[in-house]
Image (cartoon, rainbow, N blue to C red):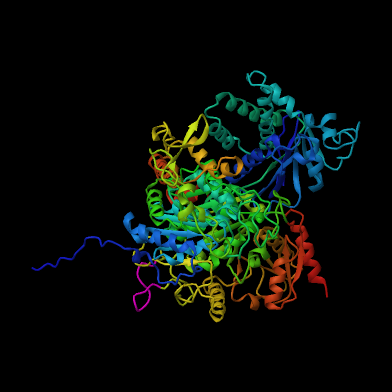
């Protein structure tokens, strides 16, 4: 008898395997291209089968994302992706569910679903492309646009106070918050890896440049001249250091963050050591974006994982509750459900 | 028929045999009238009588005690004949206070019985009920002389009976509904056994409360038996219902277990995404109890998230369901459009109530039909199935699920507050009597070149359903218009028109799988056809049967379950009659659809009072139309 052996070793997938046959139609130079590329690059390394991925999006430029992924996917309606994704994950916790959304989609029309998905903490990944503008509707201000911004709908300047997404997410009990940026592929890949490893809703804010309607809004964080002064890359267990020659740091004066020059008796040991599990400090990091506006001190913008904690996920709790009750009570037969507890017979 | 039952020298009690009686329990929201009514109903059902109930309660949870706004009523029609409605007028009205009398007296038939708790007619209660300062109690001022009035100080008798119970004032006062129930059981010669058993189950862990309730109940019975105020008792035999095993069921219960049954028969998990809203919340409550059967229920943050979570679950291969009422339907409309263009199975249950806006949240209406039919953006046709009675909620929702799963489409199920909360005996089916639901998930490519085409249709226009996780069939679906077959985004104008047509044809073809319309009562040809839909069934049926029995009016009744698509022969049926009458609890929504589609000059008969039609109203209208030129 002859047997033929097939090579059954799993074939290592590549970025190409996650690329659909659809032409990508974002504007030339859009930051979304980079995000798509980083996700497609990182997914093959994350293990798991391609058919287990479901990308869910709402409406907006970012929300075209699922069409370009060779996985399962749903392009849905404005703001509702977190609610749909919660249903997908609750109904089938085996699936690897990702939500792709934008600042308008998630924080404006989808604001309610956003806070509730944070508190429920389904084990899904949620990437918000923040370009501080409405792109698909051609240039109105968004809930993250700076006050005073001149757009098509605010010709005399916006009078709306913007949301601070990190602060909002932490307030809504997110179990993971990280920030990254389109023009730093390596950093983004590392953050996506961390988000994927997180057990629970991982909320990633990606600063993304809209070259058409809000070009350059994040350039101070990406251009060589300013990046080192303006960005604070945080890592768990490491001191908060930044500056052209890593010459500056942040230390805590009681509950007040203070920028200090390193040297002259100030060493890295004196600085604030980043602790991802410290929610109070995560709130302080989240506030850096506003502190720069509110106080005289200009703070750099933190990038990286601000906060993570392990806590129960609703999809798993739902399944567990069913298992527990099934074990305790046993399944009721359909005939018993039909008859109910009290019947009578007519002859 | 009258017989002398008890002829001890001092007193004579007459036993009257009758074939049906309507009793209305009415009191303050806190008086426990719903519970009393339900106990009375269940006992009647167990005695083999046919029943129909109509609970009616205020929108306020606890409106100020003693006021008209706080009146809560429970109406039950029971009898030895077949009963299709809770009754137009009541024969017996039980009132716990003067507000209840004021609110419900108009529908007590002349000569009817009033059982009144006199403690609810003191000056304070009279004032709360809006009687002028210093007015005499209506129990005393002669205004009730056309009725038989039994005045009982229920509050005092209950207090006396429970003076040694060790319970506080408040708890004692709560037992007075059991006293009233005992009196009524005596009046209608009904056994207390069922209620006693029920109280034992309910208060098993609180012996002092159990004891107090039992004492109050028995004291009420003894009061009826010992005092001489009642001269008449009533006897109602068991009804001649078809042989079989029965249970009592409300519309919302029927809906809940219909969903479980359909999901189990189809072999898919059941997922309910819902947001609490009157009168639909009971479906969420009921389904939440069935965790042991794997039912997943999700109380969402709002109506939109509720339907969206159900869409997400449906995408994974579950039976996705959302339950709501009118205002929630409006909020879900955008997501329904998404489900239409996705072409995934989904069930949207609308338990209608009085609208628009918050309207009359606890009252009934059928005014969402045109919203169900047209209330979406773009060309977005959906099948609609409407339930006719509480027990029919089971069958109708089972059919709605079959259509959703077999035809890959969202389906709207319409019920309303009247049948959702009302109850009737139900000769329930067994599992193997349930019709099959044929469902197959696609697991292999469906085109010759080995590619998977998510929008390639079968001869019914139905596209394949693939569970995410199926290797090799990864695909994307979306709200943007899609190219025929491939499902890729397409802005091509001709393709859009084709897709609109294909989606509509798919819904039209459902008519091939639904039964033809036929008269429920009456003949294929007659002078007048009464065309009904939804919860008007009982009133129309009773009216038509009575008219046919009287033999003067030539009338028939057709009742629609499938509101879209209509049964294929409906046009033909309609043309078999000289006149068509459509009674609806709206201003003529089905009439509009029927006129537009079949060019039949159907007459409408509207009632939008938050109350169901009475049989008498429909009889009069039929007769009027029948006799008109």
Q: As rendered, which of B98 and A20 lies closer to the eye?
A: A20
Q: Say whether residue A141 is visible.
A: yes
The image quadrant that residue B180 belongs to is: top right
Q: As rendered, which of B595 and A322 lies closer to the eye?
A: A322
The quarter of the image holding the C terminus of chain B is bottom right
Q: Could you tell me residue A126's position as x and y percent? A: 47, 52
Q: As rendered, which of B312 and B589 lies closer to the eye?
A: B312
User: Which span of residues is magenta-colored?
Assistant: B441-452
Q: Could you tell me residue B600's position as x and y percent? A: 72, 77
Asked if residue B434 lies in the magenta stretch, the reply is no
Q: Could you tell me residue B254's position as x and y percent? A: 55, 52
Position above or below: A293 against B265 = above
Kindly give the residue lying farthest to the left in the view shown: A1
Relative placement, left or right, of A339 versus B99 is: left
Q: As rendered, which of B358 and B234 lies closer to the eye?
A: B358
Relative placement, left or right, of B222 versus B477 is: right
């Amino acid at each position: 008898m002859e047997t033929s052996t097939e090579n059954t070793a799993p074939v290592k997938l590549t970025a190409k395997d996650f690329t659909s046959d659809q032409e990508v139609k974002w504007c030339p130079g859009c930051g979304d291209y980079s995000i798509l590329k980083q996700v497609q690059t990182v997914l093959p390394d994350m293990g798991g089968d391609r058919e287990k991925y479901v990308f869910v999006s709402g409406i907006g430029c970012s929300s075209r994302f699922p069409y370009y992924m060779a996985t399962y996917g749903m392009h849905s309606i404005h703001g509702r992706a977190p609610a749909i994704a919660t249903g997908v994950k609750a109904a089938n916790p085996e699936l690897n569910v990702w939500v792709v959304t934008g600042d308008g989609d998630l924080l404006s029309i989808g604001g309610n679903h956003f806070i509730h998905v944070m508190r429920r903490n389904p084990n899904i990944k949620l990437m918000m492309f923040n370009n501080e503008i409405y792109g698909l509707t051609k240039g109105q201000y968004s809930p993250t646009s700076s006050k005073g911004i001149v757009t098509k709908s605010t010709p005399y300047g916006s009078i709306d106070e913007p949301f601070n997404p990190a602060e909002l997410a932490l307030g809504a009990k997110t179990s993971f918050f990280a920030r990254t940026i389109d023009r730093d592929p390596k950093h983004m890949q590392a953050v996506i890896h961390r988000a994927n490893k997180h057990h629970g809703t991982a909320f990633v804010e990606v600063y993304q440049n809209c070259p058409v309607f809000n070009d350059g809004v994040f350039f101070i964080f990406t251009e060589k001249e300013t990046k080192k002064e303006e960005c604070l890359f945080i890592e768990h267990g490491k001191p908060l250091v930044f500056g052209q020659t890593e010459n500056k740091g942040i230390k805590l004066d009681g509950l007040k963050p203070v920028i200090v020059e390193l040297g002259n008796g100030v060493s890295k040991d004196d600085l604030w050591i980043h602790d991802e599990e410290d929610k109070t400090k995560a709130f302080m990091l989240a506030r850096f974006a506003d502190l720069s506006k509110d106080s005289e001190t200009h703070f750099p913008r933190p990038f990286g994982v601000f906060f993570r904690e392990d806590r129960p996920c609703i999809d798993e709790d739902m399944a567990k509750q069913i298992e527990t009750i099934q074990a305790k009570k046993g399944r009721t037969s359909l005939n018993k459900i039909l008859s109910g507890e009290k019947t009578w017979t007519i002859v | 028929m009258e017989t002398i039952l008890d002829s001890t020298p001092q007193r004579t009690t007459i036993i009257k045999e009758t074939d049906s009686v309507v009793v209305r329990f009415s009191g303050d929201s806190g008086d426990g009238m719903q519970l009393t009514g339900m106990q009375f109903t269940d006992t009647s059902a167990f005695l083999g009588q046919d029943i129909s109930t109509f609970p009616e309660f205020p929108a306020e949870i606890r409106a100020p005690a003693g006021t008209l706004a706080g009146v809560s009523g429970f109406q039950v029609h029971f009898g030895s004949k077949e009963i299709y409605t809770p009754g137009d007028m009541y024969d017996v009205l039980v009132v716990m206070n003067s507000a209840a009398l004021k609110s419900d007296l108009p529908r007590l038939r002349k000569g009817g019985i009033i059982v009144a708790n006199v403690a609810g007619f003191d000056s304070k209660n009279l004032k709360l009920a809006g009687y002028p300062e210093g007015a005499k109690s209506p129990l005393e001022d002669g205004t009730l002389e056309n009725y038989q009035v039994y005045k009982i100080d229920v509050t005092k008798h209950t207090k006396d009976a429970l003076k040694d119970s060790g319970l506080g004032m408040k708890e004692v006062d709560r037992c007075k509904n059991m006293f009233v129930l005992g009196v009524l059981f005596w009046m209608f010669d009904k056994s207390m056994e069922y209620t006693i058993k029920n109280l034992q189950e309910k208060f098993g862990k609180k012996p002092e409360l159990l004891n107090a309730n039992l004492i109050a109940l028995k004291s009420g019975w003894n009061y009826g038996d010992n005092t001489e105020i009642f001269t008449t008792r009533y006897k109602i035999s068991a009804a001649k219902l078809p042989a079989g095993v029965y249970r009592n069921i409300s519309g919302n219960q029927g809906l809940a277990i219909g969903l479980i049954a359909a999901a189990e028969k189809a072999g898919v998990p059941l997922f309910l995404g819902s947001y609490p809203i009157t009168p639909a919340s009971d479906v969420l409550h009921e389904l939440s109890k069935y965790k042991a059967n794997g039912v997943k229920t999700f109380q969402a943050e709002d109506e939109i998230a509720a339907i969206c979570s159900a869409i997400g679950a449906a995408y994974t291969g579950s039976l996705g369901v959302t339950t709501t009422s009118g205002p929630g339907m409006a909020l879900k409309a955008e997501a329904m459009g998404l489900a239409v263009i996705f072409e995934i199975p989904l069930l949207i249950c609308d338990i209608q109530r009085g609208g628009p806006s918050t309207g009359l949240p606890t009252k009934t209406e059928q005014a969402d039909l045109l919203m169900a039919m047209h209330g979406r953006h773009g060309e977005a046709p959906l099948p609609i199935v409407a339930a006719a009675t509480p027990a029919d909620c089971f069958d109708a929702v089972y059919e709605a699920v079959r259509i959703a799963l077999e035809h890959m489409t969202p389906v709207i199920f319409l019920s309303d507050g009247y049948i959702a909360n009302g109850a009737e005996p139900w000769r329930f089916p067994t599992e193997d009597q349930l019709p099959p639901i044929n469902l197959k998930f696609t697991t292999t490519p469906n085109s010759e070149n080995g590619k998977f085409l998510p929008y390639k249709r079968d001869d019914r226009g139905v596209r394949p359903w693939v569970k995410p996780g199926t290797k090799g069939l990864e695909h994307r679906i979306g709200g943007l218009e899609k190219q025929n077959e491939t499902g890729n985004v397409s802005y091509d104008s001709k393709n859009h028109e084709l897709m609109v047509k294909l989606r509509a044809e798919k819904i039209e073809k459902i008519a091939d799988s639904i039964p033809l319309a036929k008269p429920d009562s009456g003949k294929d040809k007659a002078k007048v056809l009464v065309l009904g839909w939804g919860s008007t069934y009982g009133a129309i049926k009773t009216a038509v049967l009575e008219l046919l029995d009287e033999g003067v009016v030539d009338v028939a009744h057709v009742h629609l379950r499938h509101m879209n698509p209509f049964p294929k022969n409906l046009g033909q049926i309609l043309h078999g009659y000289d006149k068509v009458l459509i009674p609806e609890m709206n201003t003529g929504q089905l009439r509009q659809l029927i006129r537009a589609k079949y060019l039949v000059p159907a007459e409408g008969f509207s009632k939008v009072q938050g109350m169901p039609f009475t049989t008498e109203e429909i009889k009069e209208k039929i007769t009027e139309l029948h006799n008109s030129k």
